Every structure is written in C-alpha cells, then in structure tokens.
Amino acid sequence: MTLVSGFEKIVRQQEPLADRTWLRLGGAAEFYSEPKSVDELAALVRRCREEEVPVRVLGGGSNLLIRDDQVAGMVVGLTGGGFTDIQVQGHRLQAGGGAKLAHAISETVRAGLAGLEPLVGIPGTVGGALHGNSGSRGGDIGQWADRATVMTRAGEILQRNREDLVFAYRQSSLDELVILNAEFQLEEDDPEQLTKRMQKQWIVKKASQPLSHQNVASLFKNPRGMSAGTLIDQAGLKGTRVGAVEVSQRHANFVVADQGATSQDVLRLIDMIRSRVAERLGVELETELEIW
C-alpha cells in the first residue's frame, strides 16, 4: 500500500508552499493535503504513521519560514470543514483550530465578550495562537482558554481541560500534532466600548509595524523585560540587508522580503542579528519564527 492509496482526492504531491506563508518564500511540500473532516484527517495521520512519513500542520503561515528545499513528508492545511467554525454561546467562544484569530476576535467583540480584543492585529489561526500562546501587553490567549480538543501524532483524539493546560510566555503544553478546536470562557462587556478599544489597539499596532502589502515576519521572542526590536535597533541593525531581505525600518524585529529574496537570505540575516546583539549587548535572542 502506498502513502496516497485511498487518499488520491485529497493529497497532492510537490505542492508549492511559498504563497501560503507571509514571507512568500520557500520550496514545495513532498505531499500536501486539506482534509474535509476530522475522520479524514485521523485516517491520513494514521497512514502516515504506518508509512513512517512525518506530518506537519500549516496554519496561517505568519510566523513560518520554509527553507528553499523541499519539505519532506506530509503537510496538512486545515482550511475547511469544521476546522474553521466559530460559535459564540453565552460567555463561551468555540473555535476550530484552523479558524482565523482575527475572525474569532471580531465575533466575540460583536457579541459583547471581552478578553481576546488585546490580540487584535496578531495574524494566524486560533490553533497556532494557542500553541504558541500569542499575546500582547494586554494579555495572552492562554489565560482565556478553558478546553481544547487535540489530535496526537498517532491519530488519537484527546480532550485537554483547563487543569491540563499550562501556558507560559509564547509557549504552551499543547504540543500534540494539531489543535482541532478550543473553547474560551470570556467576560461580558459593552460591544461599543470593546470595539473602540480594539480599534485603538489596531491603530497603535499598525503604526509601528511593516506595511500590510509587504512580505514580512517577526523574528525573535522578547527577552524577559526587554524588547527584541529595541535590542536589534540598539545594535545598529535597522535597515541591514542580506540579499533581498531587510530588517524593517519601522520595527527592527521584523524582516521584509523583497522580490528575488530566498529563505537562505532570511537565515543568514537571523544569524547575523543574533551574533551582533550578543556581541554588542550581551543578550541571546531566541527565534520566534518557526523554520521548516
């Protein structure tokens, strides 16, 4: 039995991945699939395990750098079916792991539920945000999470309740293969006031980040009590280029990939920034960008 036998309708080979990421860089996936249901995903994951083929889940692609070479194994996109559903009932939000975080925030604000609005402007999916405990100065997504349904690398489906969940700065205990859906317990608030707060935060965030039409990614986690962007700026690296990739002039923790850029350019720039910041300021920067 071959890997794709029985999955011919949902598995494609040598699928380009660059346009599925914010940097728009990188090579193709050896295998790529967009399952239509949890059962279909579970069957595919089990087959990959039997065939010893690695599986990766592609979310919104906002903090992902794909190397210029082929990505070995199976890449899964949760782009349809129930993976993107969003429901608000009472004080609870239920969202599929593949749902866009921005859509989830908009639905809760419209329903007069506070908690997630400080995350406005953070790209990606609900599953990706929970896995990395995305947040801002106003708080992290993990503090509102009440339950998550996950799938293991063996294709098993498990429930993770509040007492099972551990969140820290930009990390969580949700390290299984995929977060299928999550539930959040939020607080009642005035929708009009929530909307005003959200719009204000959006304006402040957008004023300090690269322009929306640019191909960008944030590189490093903020060291405790410090800003990675400020450290990179203090090291004199704002505007530094490697090939066709540049440290953003607007926010030094972002890189901008211009036409002709390669993933190797980004990797070389990351190495340069880390060594320069360590050498000049004595701080070791930890990469926030996921690299495949």
Image (cartoon, rainbow, N blue to C red):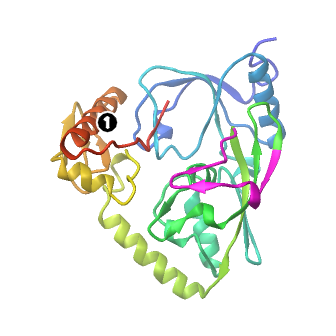
Position in image of residue 197 (x %, y %): 47, 80
User: Which residue is most to the left?
Assistant: 236
Tell me if residue 177 comes above or below residue 180 in the rendering.
above
Image point 18% across, 52% down: which residue?
234
Q: Nearer the viewer, residue 52 or 33?
A: 52
Q: Nearer the viewer, residue 91 or 75?
A: 91
Count of numbered marks: 1
Residue identifier under label 1? 270
Q: Nearer the viewer, residue 159 or 18?
A: 159
Q: Nearer the viewer, residue 148 or 209?
A: 148
Image point 73% across, 77% down: which residue?
91
Disc 1, SS: helix
Tell me if residue 53 comes above or below residue 203 in the rendering.
above
Position in image of residue 282 (x %, y %): 25, 44
Q: Is residue 33 magenta?
A: no
Q: Is residue 170 left or right of residue 2?
A: left
Q: Is residue 122 left or right of residue 256?
A: right
Q: Residue 2 is drawn in which quadrant? A: top right
For label 1, count other residues whose C-alpha is less than 10 Å away and answer few (under 14), some (14-19) or many (20+): many
Position in image of residue 4 (x %, y %): 74, 19
Q: Is residue 169 magenta?
A: yes
Query: Start and end of the magenta stretch?
Result: 158-176
Q: Is residue 228 left or right of residue 16?
A: left
Q: Amino acid at mark 1?
A: Ile
The quarter of the rendered structure image containing the N terminus is top right
Position in image of residue 172 (x %, y %): 61, 50
User: Which residue is most to the front?
Assistant: 282
User: Which residue is most to the top?
Assistant: 1
Tell me if residue 276 comes above or below residue 148 in the rendering.
above
